[in-house]
Each structure stands twice: as structure tokens, then as C-alpha cells.
Image (cartoon, helix red, strand yellow):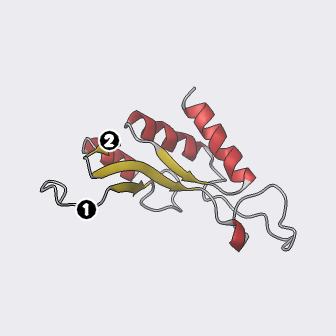
Amino acid sequence: MEQAGTLPLRVWLMFEGYENIATVGDYRHVDRFRALGLRAGFGDRVRLGPIKVIVDGWLDTRTSANYEPYADAPHLRGYCWREEDPADYRELVWRAHEAGFQLAIHCDGLRATDIILDAYEEALA
């Protein structure tokens, strides 16, 4: 429909950043996009957008990674998928940047946000 000019709306696609979110060092998706020559942008009505990365959970489920426990669940502080190896985020940021992609990063908690900001600072220094 894009090529025929009959697509009645604009579509902005995001790519999943990890093939397996629980596997540290899994950059296969970013590497595949780069090998195919894909970059952000592309078409007129169908565009390739950022790579989506989920860092932590959600506030309403008490899974976003925070420094302090939740007031209504003092035994919980949330989680980050790769908190044990934050260098993994730095590597993903660098690879995506080198491949010409933006990142759309989900991080609700302050702990997760600090980890991602540190990753950007280190990767793009």
C-alpha cells in the first residue's frame, strides 16, 4: 500500500531491542538491522522508528526499579532486567547509535532511569 500510494494513514514502526529481554549481551536485533542497511526514517507513509528497550517494570504493578521501597509494599523496590550488568545497556546504546537508530527506552523508576542515563553518558562520551 505504501508503494501504491493507497495507505490511508501514517505508520511509525518501532523495533524490539532484544531478541530475548532476559539475556544479557543479546544485540542480535540491532546487528541484523545494521547488516540489512536499515536506519530510522525510510518511507513516506511507513517509517522505521526507534528501537524499543524495556528496562524495568511499571509503577502500578510495583515493578519499576526504585531506590526506595513502595509505600504500600515495603518489601518491593522493583527490578531492572540487566541491573546486574549495566554495561550491557551502554553497549546497546552505542550499537544503536552507530547503526543510526534512536532508542525509545521504557524506564519508570528512578533507579532504572539512573542506569540508562549513565549508559548514555558512557556510550556517547
Q: Position of residue 114 (x, y in %)?
A: 70, 45
Q: Does residue 97 lie above or below 104 as drawn?
A: above
In the picture as drawn, the residue positioned furthest to the top comes out as 125
Horizontal arrangement in the rendering, residue 22 relative to residue 95 (left or right): right
Q: Position of residue 21 (x, y in %)?
A: 50, 61
What's the residue at 36%, 54% (across, down)?
12
Q: CA distance from mark 2 to mark 1?
A: 23 Å
In screen coordinates, is 94 left or right of 60? Answer: left
Q: Earlier in the sequence, mark 2 or mark 1?
A: 1
Question: Residue 91: x, y in percent?
Answer: 51, 40
Vertical position of residue 78 compared to residue 82: above or below: below
Q: Which disc is residue 113 wearing?
A: none
* 113 and 83: which is toward the camera: 113
Query: Who's the residue at 68% across and 48% down the image?
Result: 113
The N terminus, quarter of image: bottom left
Question: For the residue labelled by badge 1, is the local secondary structure a helix, a strand or a loop?
Answer: loop
Residue 8 tag number: 1
Count neighbours of disc 2 (C-alpha within 10 A) and say few if under 14, some if 14 to 19, many if 20 or more.
some
Which label was assigned to residue 39? 2
Could you say whether the residue bearing mark 2 is in a helix, strand or loop?
A: loop
Instruction: Place residue 68 in its image quadrant.
Output: bottom right
Q: Is residue 49 left or right of residue 74?
A: left
Please rate how many residues cluster around mark 1, counting C-alpha atoms within 10 Å: few if below 14, some from 14 to 19, many from 20. few
Q: Nearer the viewer, mark 2 or mark 1?
A: 1
Q: Is residue 57 left or right of residue 34?
A: right
Q: Nearer the viewer, residue 58 or 7?
A: 7
Q: Quadrant of residue 100?
A: top left
Q: Which residue type carries mark 1? A: Pro
Q: Residue at x 56, y 45 (%)?
A: 89
Q: Which amino acid type corresponds to the residue marked 2 in the rendered image? A: Arg
Q: How many marks?
A: 2
Quadrant of the frame with the C terminus? top right
